[in-house]
Amino acid sequence: MSFRTKKLISISLLTPLVEKVSWHCYYSGPYIVFGLWGINKLQLQTADKQGQLSSLQIHAYADTSFLHAEAGNFAQEIEKHMVAAFSVLELHLTAKRHAFGVFVFHLLGMDRIRTATRRLKVDLQRSAMKEGCTPLCPCEFPNWKSQIICLAALEEVEFNGLEGEDHEFDLLKLILGCAPMLKRMIVKLSEETSASNDGCAKICNIFNACSSVDCDVYDSSGEYLFGMHY
């Protein structure tokens, strides 16, 4: 099922015998908003083949105009789309140089996502914007870096397009500290970070502090840079 909406809608389905689900919803307005993050696409896809995992995919982008948007309850609106069980959470984020750590952590803290997600993939879309956000930008919520949630089901994490910002490293450290069953983390760097020895050194230090997780780092072209295996 696929549909587009310019307003919030309510749909009820009763399909007790359905085994495969492909659910797509596109939003053309800021109706599912958290801070300055708005969701423009939600997709839930059950596994087509044996060995595949069902996934919930969330596409979101940052825009300061969302701070004044009239939106529905964030968690409730997302949960409406969880029409089948899933174990993979894919986040496709267009940050426009804004911090995204608090947004990702807020999603992971939602009960149904926190308990279901075994694999997390964060895909950071490139932005044409060169300047960063202002020092007092609302993308940085106070105290989010000290929050703790239990990601007991999480086993694997993948980041694509890491740009070497401090808030990205903070998110890596938080996830490593909140996921006791985490087995592997994969990081693919952006072009800027691939050429930055400082960025690679920071990632190496973070991984060194977590000796129970296998970690692999790749540059923007997919070439293997280094890893730590225990």
Image (spheres, helix red, strand yellow):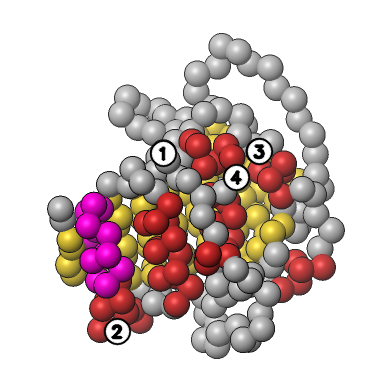
Which segment did they paint magenta?
204-216
**Mark 1 to mark 3: distance in Å?**
18 Å
Residue type at mark 3 is: Glu
Check contact, mark 4 vs mark 3: CB within 8 A.
Answer: yes
Task: Compare marks 2 and 3 and give the one earlier in the sequence.
Answer: 3
Q: Which residue is mark 1?
A: 153
Name the image quarter holding residue 97: bottom right
Which disc number belongs to residue 198? 2
**Mark 2 to mark 3: distance in Å?**
40 Å
Q: Does residue 225 show up magenta in the picture?
A: no
Q: Position of residue 178 (x, y in %)?
A: 43, 52
Task: Compare marks 4 and 3 and give the one earlier in the sequence.
Answer: 3
Q: Nearer the viewer, residue 109 or 50?
A: 109
Q: Residue at x 79, y 49 (%)?
A: 72
Q: Which residue is mark 4?
A: 110
Residue type at mark 1 is: Ala
**Mark 2 to mark 1: distance in Å?**
32 Å
8 on left or right of 57: right
Name the image quarter holding residue 103: bottom right
How many residues crowd mark 4 within 10 Å: few (<14), some (14–19), many (20+)?
Answer: some
